[in-house]
Image (cartoon, grey):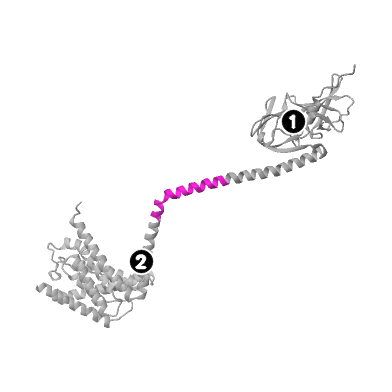
Amino acid sequence: MMESLKYIYGFIVILVLQLLCSEFINLWPMLYIAVIPLMIILLPFSVSTYVLMICGFAMGLLTDALSDGVLGLNAACCTLLGACKNMITKPMRKYDVQTDQFDMDSGEFRKGKLILLLIICYLVFFIPYVLIDGAGVSGILYIVARIAVNVVVNVIIAYLLIRLWIRRFF
Amino acid sequence: MKLPPLIYNSIGKFLVFALLETACALLIIKSSIVQKYRIMEGVRNVQSFFWEKGTAVKKYTSLSQSNKDLEEENARLLAQNIFLKDYIVKSQGESKLEELSSQLKDNAGDSSLTSYSFTLAKVIKNTINTTHNYLVIDKGRRDGITEDLGVVTPSGVVGIIRGVGEKFSYVLSFLNLRQSISAKIGSTESPGTLKWEGGSIYKAYLTEIPLNTEVAKGDTVYTSGNSSFFPSDIPVGKAISFSVENGAHKKVEVELLQDFSNLDYVIVLKNHDKHEIDSLSMLKPPSPKK
């Protein structure tokens, strides 16, 4: 019960954080600070793909509805991330942990593995995001550059958030 | 057949994923014009891809009908082609006949050909390597051909028809030891007998020329017109040399104008007066009064 509440609370915090970022942090038109993928990444391995997809869809839709963007864009990308998350983490999980429980605070998930996981997850999130947002109007170089910039910046932010704040919170 | 649970699970995940993504796509289409345009473009591409494949499958399944239609079309075109070819051959034949008959008239003169009608025929077979040569032409009874008609070209005599079939006729070639025609040399009116004696297909001999007849090298040899087969004055050859035979008459060596090795078309001459001439020739002289 406490475990569930913890995640619901984290869910709300991340959603608020995302809305604040969307509303107030506009550093560069190319850049989009995406915090919600973190919630899907941080959900335990035991959560099934069905739940991950529905959670991603719900969170993305809420973000789209409450922020000033294309309705359904975040929902589509988060659903995709939810569908792929278990596939991405499965090889890492097998190698690093014996149990099916993923705890960021246990220290079993080392720095390198965490960054790799974040990079792959953000790539999965940002490739469709940039393609749909640009709607095929932009050139290939612009698309690649935008994906790269967003992945790099968001991975750094996500890593810092995990290490400095979320680790303590969870 | 029972599917393993893993496959059920995968299908279920895919269906939920597709459902959620479709919902997202619908929301995106509804909220943004640019994305709507792009997504609809993609949908149309997918649609046209399936339409194209569907049409290809439909076409494939209806191949037997298409084949049948093509066969019918092919048969129709083939029939049309045969008709047109026939038409072209007939047209060419008519123009060829006109060309050859005008040449013949130029060479022989109009007056000698007044009682003759012409039929153009194509040479189907032509032998020149034996002593009894013959030709087969593509005109027969149905074209009005009968036996004993002369066959010529503007360059000379070819032969006489000796056998007639429904569609083809047999021509006894001039290059035949059994064949001879009545001919004269130069402007004289003394007829002789022109005969091929074997050997070269370009040489023949004009015999029984009276001794008093002037013969010079290069004189043209013409048909005499003394038979009902050929009109008079058709040039046949040129005198090369002559000799006196048995002290009684001259024998002239003639170079034939007609090249028998290169015969494509010939003219069959029908003499409309032949029947009358032949019947008069059969008359017996009146018996002397006692």
Establish if A48 lies above or below B189.
below
Q: Which residues are magenta?
A: B56-80
- Relative image position of residue A148 (x, y in whole percent): 31, 71
Q: Main secondary structure of the magenta part?
A: helix
Crowding at mark 1 (Cα within 10 Å: few <14, some 14-19, many 20+): some
Outermost residue, bottom side: A24
Establish if B41 lies above or below B248.
below
Residue for badge 1? B202
Label 1 – label 2 distance at C-alpha = 85 Å
Q: Is residue B228 visible?
A: no
Specify the amino acid type for callout 1: Tyr
Q: Is residue A161 visible?
A: yes
Which subunit holds the residue at mark 2?
Answer: B
Residue B192, located in which quarter of the rendered image? Answer: top right
- Relative image position of residue B288 (x, y in whole percent): 88, 18
Q: Which mark is residue B43?
A: 2
Crowding at mark 2 (Cα within 10 Å: few <14, some 14-19, many 20+): few
Residue B230, located in which quarter of the rendered image? Answer: top right
